Amino acid sequence: MKMMTVATLAGYGGPEMVRLQQAPRPSPGQGEVLVRVRAAPVTAGDARMRSGKVPRGFGLLLRLAIGWSKPRNPPGWSYSGEVAGLGEGARGFSLGQRVFGITGIKGGAHRDDLVVKPAGGAILPMPESLSFEEGAAFFFGGLTAAEFLLDKAGLRAGERVLINGATGAVGSAALQIARAQGAHITAICSAPNHALARQLGADAVIDYRSQPVSGRYDVVMDVIGTLPWPGARAHLTEGGRLLLITADLAATLGAALHPRRDGCQIFAGTSSEAREKMDRLLGLHATGAYHPQIGFALPFAEIARAHAMAETFHKPGNIVVTMNP
């Protein structure tokens, strides 16, 4: 019996709760595709689900959704790799083809081999313009940034945008998408990441450790949850939009129940993983408007270290682990 390495979670807690184990290599069933995984991201979401440390008010909901004493869902939200097997009736893919996709909340992408069903966004052909590391990181930050900036805020050319937490997975995608829309962008991030922020599209940068936020903006995007409505209000123009990427339960409910305040709008919640959203992101990539940024690529054996880095919420770009070199 052929074996593979899979990541599991022993329970809620620190990075040491991530364990690598051996398991039988799966075979694709009717209409399924077997993917030899080459890379997968370790995201802030992975770190939150492993640690159980989520924004205030969501802890009970998290455990009711995914498990009380330990997460039921195996880790890994998305992946890139190559087609290694085709089940009977599987069409549209060929052996050796480069692919990527989303496993979503059900997880399971942190493994050597993954069986997927070619429906929705579970598996797509990967552009040659992306490395396996970039393909693995493609959807996580990009889908969120595009939905909040384009669908919720309706960002227009010439508008002024403030991005708080501008160089992580979501922020680095938001910088590029806002630049492509013709916005004037101010990025809040640590001084070591200022050069990256400017490279990705920022017109001005603010060091959150030493510089106060000033000025008014048409759109304020709070990626890391430190600029909610009370602090953002003074920096929004009339008709401004506040995008809460990270928010506690009270702020999330407030955005849903009372989205219009003082002539401004507040948006919170999750982003869609629908196929049309994925296709739009691929279109942005094809025009040069978006390219995922890789901060660190670690071997699969160092996945616990990747989790430790992800939960600092201060890393540049995306963190990925690589399998099957």
Image: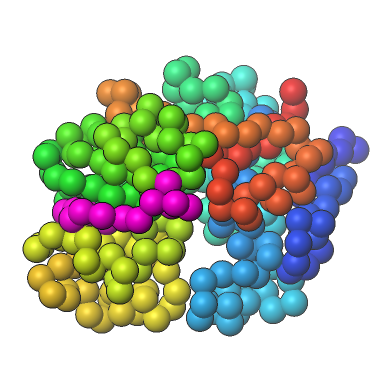
Residue 318 covered by magenta stretch: no
Residue at 51%, 71% (x, y): give it: 55
Residue 213 covered by magenta stretch: yes
Q: Quadrant of the N terminus?
A: top right
Of the pair 187 and 295, the residue shown nearer to us = 187
Residue 298, percent from left and from top: 71, 34
Q: Quadrant of the C terminus?
A: top right
Of the pair 278 and 235, the residue shown nearer to us = 235
Residue at 62%, 20% (x, y): give it: 96
Q: Is residue 295 left or right of residue 85?
A: left
Residue 2, percent from left and from top: 87, 35
Q: Which residues are magenta?
A: 207-221
- Asked whether residue 181 is in view, the answer is yes
Way the structure is coloured: rainbow
Of the pair 158 and 48, the residue shown nearer to us = 158
Name the dominant secondary structure of the magenta segment.
Answer: loop
Q: How many marks?
A: 0
Residue at 63%, 37% (x, y): give it: 320
Query: 60 above or below 12?
Result: below
Q: Is residue 261 left or right of residue 12?
A: left
Residue 210, percent from left and from top: 44, 51
